[in-house]
Image (cartoon, helix red, strand yellow):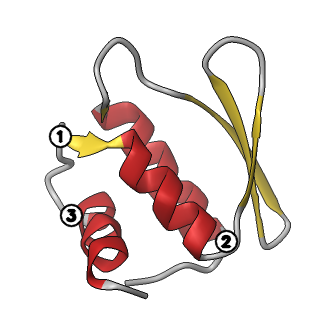
Amino acid sequence: MNAKHRKTLELIFENPVRPDVNWSDIEALLRHIGAEISEGKGSRVRIALKGIRAVFHRPHPKRETDKGALKSMRRFLIEAGVKL
């Protein structure tokens, strides 16, 4: 895992939850760790990783992921066995 992906993972797991993590960085991390990402309707993004599936909404008009979505991403990664 390169430094950029590692930093993104650290930001996802940081407490308190950050309001400034770019969604594109999260998608890059997910692809790097082997997640399958497919587009849904509108801003929906379907993600599958190690048998765990989730649907997220790509943030717009801002690029930053909101705190609620970041908490959900953290839960998703934990369920898929991804750790710091």
Q: Position of residue 76 (x, y in %)?
A: 59, 57
Q: Earlier in the sequence, mark 2 or mark 1?
A: 1
Nearer the observer, 56 or 5: 5
The answer to whether mark 2 and mark 1 are in CB contact below 8 A is no
Quarter assignment of residue 79: bottom right
Quarter assignment of residue 8: bottom left
Of circles 3 and 1, the one toward us is 1
Report how far apart the C-alphas of labels 3 and 1 lie in the structure. Answer: 12 Å
Q: Which residue is mark 3?
A: 14
Q: Earlier in the sequence, mark 2 or mark 3?
A: 3
Q: What's under tag 1, amino acid-wise?
A: Asp
Q: What's under tag 2, amino acid-wise?
A: Ala
Quick check: 46 above or below 11? above
Query: Total label count?
Result: 3
Q: Which residue is mark 1?
A: 20
Q: Tell me what residue is drawn at x 34 percent, y 12 percent.
A: 61
Q: Tell me what residue is drawn at x 14 percent, y 52 percent.
A: 16
Q: Position of residue 84 (x, y in %)?
A: 37, 84
Q: Position of residue 68 (x, y in %)?
A: 38, 33
Report how far apart the C-alphas of labels 2 and 1 lie in the structure. Answer: 23 Å
Q: Which residue is mark 2?
A: 80
Q: Position of residue 19 (x, y in %)?
A: 18, 37
User: Circle 3 sits in a helix, a strand or a loop, which is it?
Assistant: loop
User: Circle 2 sits in a helix, a strand or a loop, which is it?
Assistant: loop
Tell me if 31 is positioned left or right of 4 in this view. right
Q: Earlier in the sequence, mark 3 or mark 1?
A: 3
User: Circle 1 sits in a helix, a strand or a loop, which is it?
Assistant: loop
Neighbourhood count class around disc 1 (C-alpha, 10 Å): few under 14, some 14–19, many 20 upward: some
